C-alpha cells in the first residue's frame, strides 16, 4: 500500500485540522524555520509508531489543554485480497473497510493520559442498519446466532467455518444496509476480524525517519545495527563450525578440569568428589565493529558532512533490513533537512539519489529542506509549502501559485537568458548542452544541417527536469520574453512512470505548437558507442533501453552526471550516424538527431 494523504489535528502548531496530500514518489516540505515542517514528519512517525519519535505531553496544542491529537493516514494501492489465515481470504472492500475512493483510512486519537495507547479507527463506508452494523464485533458463534435471528438462509453461506462467509451472507440478506461513513473502533473487533486488523497493520508501509539532529558518530545505533546484522548473518553461516569449535573447547576445558580434580583427590578426596565441571552457557561471540577509512580514521573523526552521508545510508540499509525481517510490503523514507553539512555538489547528488529511490516500486520519500538547489529540483506535484501565521501551522499545496510561493520562499532564480538570444531550447541538465552542441558541430561539418545552435544564437537553458520549480520558472520567463522556444528531454523508457509523464508533457507542448522532442533511446547516454570508452570489449553493453549512464559510470569509476562530459566529445561523425539511425516499419530510414536539430534551428529563420 502507498501513503496518499495525511491529516493532522492538535499536534503542536497544527491546531486546525490539516490535510496534506502525499506524492506517489517524492514530497518536499518547504518553509521558514519553525513553520511546522518537522512536525509533519514527526506526526507521521507517531502514527506509524516510529522508533525515532516519542509522543509526549508537550506535543499537544498548547491553546487547548484538554485537546486530543488526531492523526489520520489514507492509503491507496489496496491489495485485492487479504489472507486472514491459511484457508481464509477476504477483501477490504467486501468487508466494508474502505472509504468512498476505495482507499484505506485509519485514524489514531491520542489522549494526554494515554500517550502509548491511542484509540484506532477505520473510517469507511459501512453498513449502519441495525443488526448489520456490528458484524466485525462478532465472533463466529455470535455471527451464526445473529444469522438465525435475522432469518439468513444458512445454505447461502459459502463456508460455514469462516466468519467472512457469514458476514457476507448476513449483509447480502439485508434489503437496505444504509451504507454511510462510520468510524469503526478496531479495538472492538472480534473473531477473525481481530486477525484481519492485525493483517491490515502488516500491510502498512514501514516508516523510517532520519532526523536532522541525530547523532553522527560511529557509535550511532543506526550505524551499528547493519554491522551487527552482518555479524549475525556470518554466525549463522558458520554455525556448524562454531558448534564444533565450542565442543572442542568444552572438551579441552573438561579435560583440564578433570586433571585438576585428579590432583585434588590426592590431597582431599571428599572435596574433589563434590566438584563437577559444568559448562554453564554458550559463548556470546560478540564483536565490536566501527567503520574506518583507508587511512584508519573512524567515522567520528571525519567531517560532519561525511558522517551524515554515511549514517544516512546506514539508515537506508537498516530500513531495508527491517522490511525484509518484518515482511513489510513497502517503505516510506523521511529525511529532515538531508542537506545539512553537505557541500552544494552533494546536495544535488542527494536529491538525485532520492528521486531514484522514490521511483523504485513501493518506495516513497518525504523530506524537508531550506536549500534552493534541492527545492528547485523537486517535482512541482510534490511541493508542499508550510507556513505559520499567528502561531497556527498550515500547508499550501493545491493553489495555482504554489510554485511561485515556494520559489519566492527559497529565493530560486530561473536560468538567465543570454543577452542577444533569438530562441531558447530547454534541456534537463548540463550534459544535454554538451550532447546537443557536439552533435550539432559534427552534423554541420558534414553537411547534414546548415547551422549550429551558436550560429543561430539559440540558447540552451537548463531546467533541472520537467515538473520542477526551475522548469516552471524558466518556461514562464521564456513566455514573458516572447522568444520562440523548444524542449529536449530524455524519454526515460526504462522507467514507465517517468516515460508516461515526459510523453504527456511533449504531447501537450506540441499541441500548443511548441517544438518538443523526446529521445527515442532511454537517455542521451544510450547514444554513446562502446568503442570510445577505452574499456575491454564486453565490459559495457549499451542498448536502446539499458541504464547506460549507470553502467558506464560504474565501469569508468566516475559519477553518473559526468559520463557525457567525459566521453561524448570523442564521438565521431560515423559513430553518431550509426547511433541515430532507425528504420520505420515501412522500411523508411530516419536519422533521429539530424531531424530534431534540423527542426530546432528553424526556430530562428535564416
Image (spheres, rainbow, N blue to C red):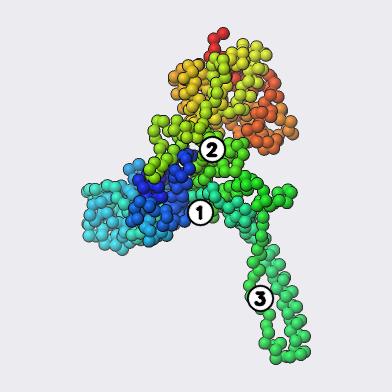
Q: Earlier in the sequence, mark 3 or mark 2?
A: 3
Reading the image, the residue beneath label 1 is 52
Residue 138: % across, % down: 31, 60
| Label 1 residue SS | loop
Reading the image, the residue beneath label 3 is 279
Residue at coordinates 60% horizontally, 47% vertically from top-left? 308
Q: Nearer the viewer, mark 3 or mark 2?
A: 2
Residue 231 drawn above or below residue 17: below
Residue at coordinates 38% horizontally, 43% vertically from top-left? 390
Q: How many marks?
A: 3
* Gap in angstroms between the C-alphas marked 3 and 2: 60 Å
Residue 149 drawn above or below residue 519: below
Image quarter for residue 272?
bottom right
Q: Circle 3: is it few (<14), some (14-19), or many (20+) Cα within 10 Å?
A: few
| Label 2 residue SS | loop
Residue 51 drawn above or below residue 267: above
Point out the residue furthest to the front here: 390
Image quarter for residue 556?
top right
Q: Earlier in the sequence, mark 3 or mark 1?
A: 1
Q: Quadrant of the C terminus?
A: top right
Q: Circle 1: is it few (<14), some (14-19), or many (20+) Cα within 10 Å?
A: some
Residue 165: % across, % down: 33, 54
Q: Nearer the viewer, mark 3 or mark 1?
A: 1
Image quarter for residue 268?
bottom right
Q: Is residue 173 left or right of residue 575?
A: left
Residue 598 drawn above or below residue 394: above
Q: Earlier in the sequence, mark 1 or mark 2?
A: 1
Amino acid at each position: 500500500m502507498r501513503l496518499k494523504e495525511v491529516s493532522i489535528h492538535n499536534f503542536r502548531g497544527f491546531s486546525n485540522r490539516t490535510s496534506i496530500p502525499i506524492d506517489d514518489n517524492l514530497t518536499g516540505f518547504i518553509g521558514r524555520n519553525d513553520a511546522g515542517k518537522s512536525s509533519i514528519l514527526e506526526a507521521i512517525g507517531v502514527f506509524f509508531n516510529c522508533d525515532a519519535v516519542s509522543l509526549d505531553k508537550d506535543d499537544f496544542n498548547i491553546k487547548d489543554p484538554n485537546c486530543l491529537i488526531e492523526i489520520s493516514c489514507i492509503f491507496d494501492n489496496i491489495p485485492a485480497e487479504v489472507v486472514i489465515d491459511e484457508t481464509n481470504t477476504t477483501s477490504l472492500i467486501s468487508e466494508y473497510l474502505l472509504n468512498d475512493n476505495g482507499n484505506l483510512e485509519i485514524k489514531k486519537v491520542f489522549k494526554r493520559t494515554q500517550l502509548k495507547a491511542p484509540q484506532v479507527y477505520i473510517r469507511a463506508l459501512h453498513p449502519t442498519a441495525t443488526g448489520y452494523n456490528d458484524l466485525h464485533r462478532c465472533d463466529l458463534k455470535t455471527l451464526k446466532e445473529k444469522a438465525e435471528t435475522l432469518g439468513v438462509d444458512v445454505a447461502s453461506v459459502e463456508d460455514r467455518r469462516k466468519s467472512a462467509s457469514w458476514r457476507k451472507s448476513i449483509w447480502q440478506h439485508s434489503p437496505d444496509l444504509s451504507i454511510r461513513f462510520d468510524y469503526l473502533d478496531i479495538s472492538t473487533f472480534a473473531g477473525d476480524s481481530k486477525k484481519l486488523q492485525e493483517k491490515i497493520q502488516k500491510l502498512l508501509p514501514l516508516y523510517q525517519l532520519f532526523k536532522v539532529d541525530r547523532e553522527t558518530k560511529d557509535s550511532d545505533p543506526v550505524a551499528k545495527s547493519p554491522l551487527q546484522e552482518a555479524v549475525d548473518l556470518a554466525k549463522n553461516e558458520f554455525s556448524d563450525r562454531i558448534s564444533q569449535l565450542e565442543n572442542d573447547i568444552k572438551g579441552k576445558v573438561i579435560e583440564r578440569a578433570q586433571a585438576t580434580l585428579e590432583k585434588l583427590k590426592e590431597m582431599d578426596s571428599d572435596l574433589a568428589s563434590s566438584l563437577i565441571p559444568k559448562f554453564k552457557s554458550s559463548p556470546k561471540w560478540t564483536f565490536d565493529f566501527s567503520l574506518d577509512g583507508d587511512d584508519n580514521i573512524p567515522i567520528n573523526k571525519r567531517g560532519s558532512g561525511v558522517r551524515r552521508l554515511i549514517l544516512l545510508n546506514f539508515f537506508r540499509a537498516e530500513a531495508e533490513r527491517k522490511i525484509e525481517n518484518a515482511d513489510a510490503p513497502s517503505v516510506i523514507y523521511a529525511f529532515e533537512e538531508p542537506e545539512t553539512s553537505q557541500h552544494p555538489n552533494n546536495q544535488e547528488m542527494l536529491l538525485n539519489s532520492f528521486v531514484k529511490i522514490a521511483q523504485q516500486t513501493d518506495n516513497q520519500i518525504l523530506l524537508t529542506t531550506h536549500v534552493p538547489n534541492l527545492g528547485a529540483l523537486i517535482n512541482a506535484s510534490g511541493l508542499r509549502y508550510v507556513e505559520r501565521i499567528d502561531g497556527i501551522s498550515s500547508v499550501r499545496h493545491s493553489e495555482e501559485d504554489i510554485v511561485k510561493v515556494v520559489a519566492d520562499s527559497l529565493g530560486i532564480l530561473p536560468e538567465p537568458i543570454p543577452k542577444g538570444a533569438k530562441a531558447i531550447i530547454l534541456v534537463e541538465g548540463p550534459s544535454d548542452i554538451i550532447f546537443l552542441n557536439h552533435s550539432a558541430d559534427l552534423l554541420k561539418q558534414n553537411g547534414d544541417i546548415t547551422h549550429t545552435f551558436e550560429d543561430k544564437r539559440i540558447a540552451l537553458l537548463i531546467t533541472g527536469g520537467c515538473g520542477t520549480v526551475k522548469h516552471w520558472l524558466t518556461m514562464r520567463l521564456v513566455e514573458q520574453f516572447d522568444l520562440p522556444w523548444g524542449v529536449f528531454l530524455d524519454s526515460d523508457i526504462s522507467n514507465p512512470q517517468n516515460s508516461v509523464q515526459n510523453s504527456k508533457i511533449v504531447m501537450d507542448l506540441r499541441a500548443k505548437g511548441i517544438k518538443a522532442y523526446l529521445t527515442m533511446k532511454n537517455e542521451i547516454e544510450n547514444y554513446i558507442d562502446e568503442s570510445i570508452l577505452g574499456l575491454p570489449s564486453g565490459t559495457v553493453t549499451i542498448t536502446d533501453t539499458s541504464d547506460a549512464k549507470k553502467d558506464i559510470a560504474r565501469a569508468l569509476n566516475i559519477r553518473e552526471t559526468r559520463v557525457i562530459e567525459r566521453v561524448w566529445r570523442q564521438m565521431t561523425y560515423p559513430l553518431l550516424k550509426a547511433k541515430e539511425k532507425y528504420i520505420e516499419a515501412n522500411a523508411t530510414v530516419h536519422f533521429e538527431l539530424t531531424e530534431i536539430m534540423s527542426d530546432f534551428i528553424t526556430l530562428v529563420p535564416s
